[in-house]
């Protein structure tokens, strides 16, 4: 039976392992990305709910996020 040299076999094994490692890195990244996107969607939902609560309490306002000061939005429809 024919056989590769030890150096050839070693090179093939190293390159193959490198590919496997890179694929695993991509998989880990995609999983982290998925969970981050889920957290973003959850926080956005919480923010929307809080915005609705604030709007029902104060009406349509512009909020300075640094100071907490707010002013009422002008009615752009003219009514």
Image: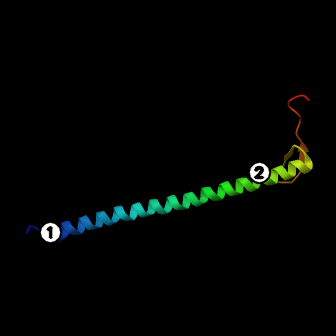
CA distance for labels 1 and 2: 64 Å
Residue at x 50% of width, y 60% of height: 29
Secondary structure of the residue carrying tag 1 is loop
Q: Is residue 60 above or below residue 18?
A: above
Residue 63 versus residue 60: which sits nearer the camera? 60
Q: Residue furthest bottom?
A: 6
Label 2 neighbour load within 10 Å: few <14, some 14-19, many 20+: few
Q: Quadrant of residue 24?
A: bottom left
76 displayed left or right of 7: right
50 displayed left or right of 31: right
Q: Is residue 65 visible?
A: no
Badge 1 or badge 2: first in the primary sequence: 1
**Residue beneath label 2, please?**
48
**Residue beneath label 1, please?**
5
Dots 1, 2 in contact, CB < 8 A: no
Q: Which quadrant is home to the N terminus?
A: bottom left
């Amino acid at each position: 039976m024919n056989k590769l040299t030890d150096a050839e076999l070693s090179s093939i094994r190293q390159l193959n392992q490198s590919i496997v490692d890179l694929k695993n890195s991509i998989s880990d990244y995609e999983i982290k990305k998925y969970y981050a996107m889920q957290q973003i969607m959850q926080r956005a939902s919480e923010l929307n709910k809080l915005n609705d609560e604030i709007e029902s309490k104060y009406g349509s306002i512009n909020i300075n996020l640094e100071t907490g000061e707010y002013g009422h939005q002008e009615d752009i429809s003219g009514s």
